[in-house]
Image (cartoon, rainbow, N blue to C red):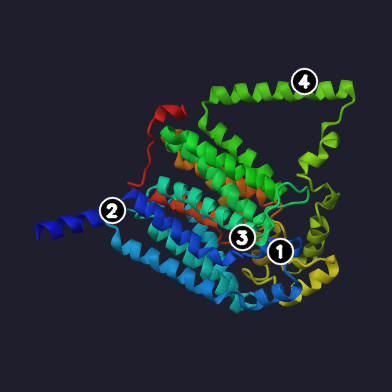
């Protein structure tokens, strides 16, 4: 009996150990969003599905994906019942997220397609419930480390897919790494992992060389996606993480030094009649200069076209995830002369779905998460808040030219996980050496 009791206790201890919880969380998120994977993506011309496929997606969605999201919600509910002794503390960002979700749910009452709105809203709600509940069992560092593992897992899957189909050709000038998803989505996945790995180097200074190595690997493949918005947003995010972690004196000195360095460089360029932007445009555009003009790769004409739809329903929009129906996809594809099923801007997409009110709520939520996390980090020195600072900064910057901020995705899920884990009293992380953060 004693041996059985010891074995049961050992098994229970392992199941609730940090590494086991991290592995389980990694598996949940990876499986939940696995439906976004397309192993043949690298074979698709220009990585764009034809109009029939996009219209079919708009009509029906993915039944398996709905089942997986329901399973995610079930795990969250079970975690709420299983975990004991922790109290939830509401903070301003989570309160705003709740208000945004309520507005999105209410949009079913005025949606042009209530069925689609309810169906897709339920997926976001299931994801939120799953994250909220499971956070009662984990620490913030578990969520950040899981973000690294999911990013590495999707990267490995993508490399295998391209090697199998013979499309892994990084030596070619027009190559874009896609793997098992569109390069722009892959870029967001790699950026999430990069920011998480950079944060983990601060959480676990003893292993910082390992995490910096992972950061370098993920950022290298991010460059290979040639996604300009995500690639540019990562340095901005890391810069803001640095600012948030520095004393005020260092920030002021850094700003003055940066100002004089930039001013001196501009003076040299003027005297020498050298235009660094024109001379290095191909590098700055990641080798995609032929696709770029004053129209931001077709985005400005698209946004101009979509503004006419916004003017019809400016305040409440067409309903959560309801605008991109087969008719609108067909009409806009005919008008723009390319197949499109998103606005290529989180802010434009949200205005189409939830109106100006919804966009204001989303923007306020993102801004509040950023400032709340930065201020709270300076008070507590908990590195998990740096992941929130960098992650939400990435989403804000990338959101200007890419969609995704207003829905469920791996990066928004991990941000919500980290934010919620901080809100369960007792889920606080410390570093191996807090003095490294000073």
Q: Nearer the viewer, residue 36 or 429?
A: 36
Residue at left offset 63%, top offset 75%: 110
Q: Can residue 325 be seen?
A: no
Q: Earlier in the sequence, mark 3 or mark 1?
A: 1
Tell me the CA gap for discs 4 and 1: 47 Å
Quadrant in the picture for residue 35: bottom right
The mark lying in front, picked from 3 and 4, is 3
Q: Is residue 187 above or below residue 254?
A: below
**Which disc, if any, is residue 14?**
2
Q: Position of residue 372 (x, y in %)?
A: 50, 43
Q: Secondary structure at mark 4?
A: helix
Quadrant in the picture for residue 255: top right
**Position of residue 362 in the picture relative to residue 332 (left or right):** left
Q: Is residue 423 above or below residue 165?
A: above
Q: Earlier in the sequence, mark 1 or mark 2?
A: 2
**Which disc, if any, is residue 349?**
none
**Which disc, if any, is residue 43?**
1
Residue at left offset 59%, top offset 57%: 160
Q: Secondary structure at mark 2?
A: helix
Q: Nearer the viewer, residue 88 or 435?
A: 435
The mark lying in front, picked from 2 and 3, is 3
Q: Is there CB contact under 8 Å for labels 1 and 2?
A: no
Tell me the CA gap for discs 3 and 1: 10 Å
Instruction: Please give the residue where the numbered disc 3 appears in the rendered image.
Output: 161
Q: Is residue 59 above or below residue 438?
A: below
At label 1, counting other C-alpha atoms closer than 10 Å, the crowd grade (few under 14, some 14-19, many 20 or more) is: some
Residue at left offset 56%, top offset 32%: 242
Instruction: Please give the residue where the numbered disc 4 appears in the rendered image.
Output: 264
Tell me the CA gap for discs 2 and 4: 58 Å
């Amino acid at each position: 009996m004693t041996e059985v009791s010891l074995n049961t206790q050992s098994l229970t201890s392992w199941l609730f150990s940090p590494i086991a919880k991290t592995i389980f969380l990694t598996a949940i998120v990876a499986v939940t969003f696995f439906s976004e994977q397309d192993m043949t993506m690298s074979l698709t011309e220009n990585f764009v599905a034809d109009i029939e496929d996009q219209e079919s997606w708009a009509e029906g969605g993915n039944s398996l994906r709905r089942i997986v999201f329901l399973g995610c919600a079930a795990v969250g509910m079970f975690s709420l019942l299983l975990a004991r002794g922790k109290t939830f503390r509401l903070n301003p960002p989570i309160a705003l997220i709740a208000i945004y979700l309520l507005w999105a749910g209410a949009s079913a009452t005025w949606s042009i397609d209530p069925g689609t709105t309810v169906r897709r809203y339920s997926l976001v709600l299931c994801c939120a419930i799953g994250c909220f509940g499971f956070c009662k069992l984990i620490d913030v560092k578990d969520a950040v480390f899981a973000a690294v593992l999911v990013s590495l897992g999707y990267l490995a899957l993508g490399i295998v897919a391209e090697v199998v189909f013979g499309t892994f050709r990084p030596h070619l000038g027009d190559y874009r790494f896609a793997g098992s998803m569109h390069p722009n989505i892959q870029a967001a996945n790699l950026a999430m992992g990069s920011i998480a790995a950079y944060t983990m180097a601060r959480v676990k200074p003893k292993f910082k060389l390992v995490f910096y190595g992972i950061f370098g690997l993920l950022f290298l493949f991010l460059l290979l996606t040639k996604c300009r918005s995500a690639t540019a947003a990562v340095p901005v995010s890391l810069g803001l993480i640095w600012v948030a972690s520095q004393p005020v004196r260092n920030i002021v000195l850094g700003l003055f030094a940066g100002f004089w360095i930039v001013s001196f460089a501009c003076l040299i360029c003027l005297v020498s009649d050298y235009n660094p932007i024109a001379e290095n445009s191909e590098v700055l555009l990641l080798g995609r200069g032929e696709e770029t003009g004053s129209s931001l790769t077709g985005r400005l004409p698209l946004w101009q076209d979509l503004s006419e739809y916004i003017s019809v329903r400016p305040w409440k929009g067409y309903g959560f995830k309801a605008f991109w129906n087969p008719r609108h996809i067909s009409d806009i594809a005919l008008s723009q002369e390319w197949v499109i099923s998103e606005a290529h801007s989180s802010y434009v997409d949200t205005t189409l779905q939830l109106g100006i009110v919804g966009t204001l709520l989303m923007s306020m939520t993102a801004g509040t998460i950023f400032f709340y996390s930065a201020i709270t980090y300076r008070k507590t020195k908990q590195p998990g808040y740096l992941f929130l600072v960098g992650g939400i900064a990435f989403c804000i910057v990338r959101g200007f030219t890419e969609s995704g901020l207003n829905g469920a995705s791996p990066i928004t899920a991990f941000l919500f996980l980290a934010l919620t884990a901080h809100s369960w009293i007792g889920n606080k992380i410390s570093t191996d050496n807090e003095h490294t953060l000073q």
